[in-house]
Image (cartoon, rainbow, N blue to C red):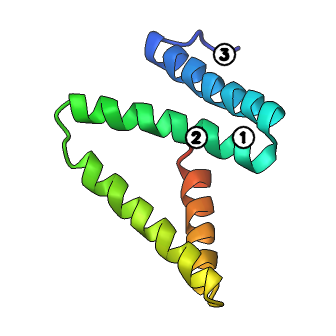
Amino acid sequence: MTRPQIGIERRQSNQRRFYVEGESQAIELRGDDKGGAESWLRVTRKWVVQEFKAGRTDVFGGWAMVLRLFLTAMQRRAAGDPRVWDDLQVYAKSVTDQFPPK
């Protein structure tokens, strides 16, 4: 028999369900890759604002660094060198598998 969830567990479960359902709806409306990307961008933008309001002002520097990394990987791939892109995809997959968004 499983015990009932405590408040914080229930909130995390509901929040995770909200993210997954939002991604599913966006995929249905806009297509697989584009819909998923727009959904996670919306969620990320919300979290960046919340982190900033909570006094963690380094969130913008971190976000800018992630965007610069992504741009660099796309530019290198377009120039014929897919190594950075491939490494970024492998790393992102392993991190999100190990630590999925809550």
Residue type of the residue flagged with mark 3: Thr
Q: CA distance from mark 1 to mark 2?
A: 9 Å
Of callouts 1 and 3, the N-terminal one = 3
Instruction: Tell us which disc is closer to us: 2 or 3.
Output: 2
Where is residue 10? Give x, y as percent: 54, 15
Of callouts 1 and 2, the N-terminal one = 1
Q: Are marks 1 and 2 in contact (CB under 8 Å)?
A: no
Q: Residue at x 22, y 28 (%)?
A: 53
Q: Residue at x 78, y 37 (%)?
A: 30
Where is residue 86? Give x, y as percent: 64, 77
Image quadrant assignment for residue 51: top left
Q: Residue at x 28, y 47 (%)?
A: 59
Residue type of the residue flagged with mark 2: Trp
Relative vertical location of residue 72 with respect to residue 92 in this rendering, above or below = below
Q: Mark 2 highlights which residue?
A: 40
**Quick check: 59 left or right of 96?**
left
**Quick check: 53 left or right of 36?**
left
Q: Mark 1 highlights which residue?
A: 35
Of callouts 2 and 3, the N-terminal one = 3
Disc number at residue 2? Answer: 3
Q: Residue at x 53, y 48 (%)?
A: 99
Where is residue 90? Give x, y as percent: 62, 70
Is residue 101 visible from the viewing direction of this image?
A: no
Image quadrant assignment for residue 28: top right
Q: Secondary structure at mark 2?
A: helix
Instruction: Tell us which disc is closer to us: 1 or 3.
Output: 1
Count residues near mark 3 (Cα–Cα under 10 Å), then give few for <14, some for 14-19, many for 20+: few
Q: Quadrant of the image for the N terminus?
A: top right
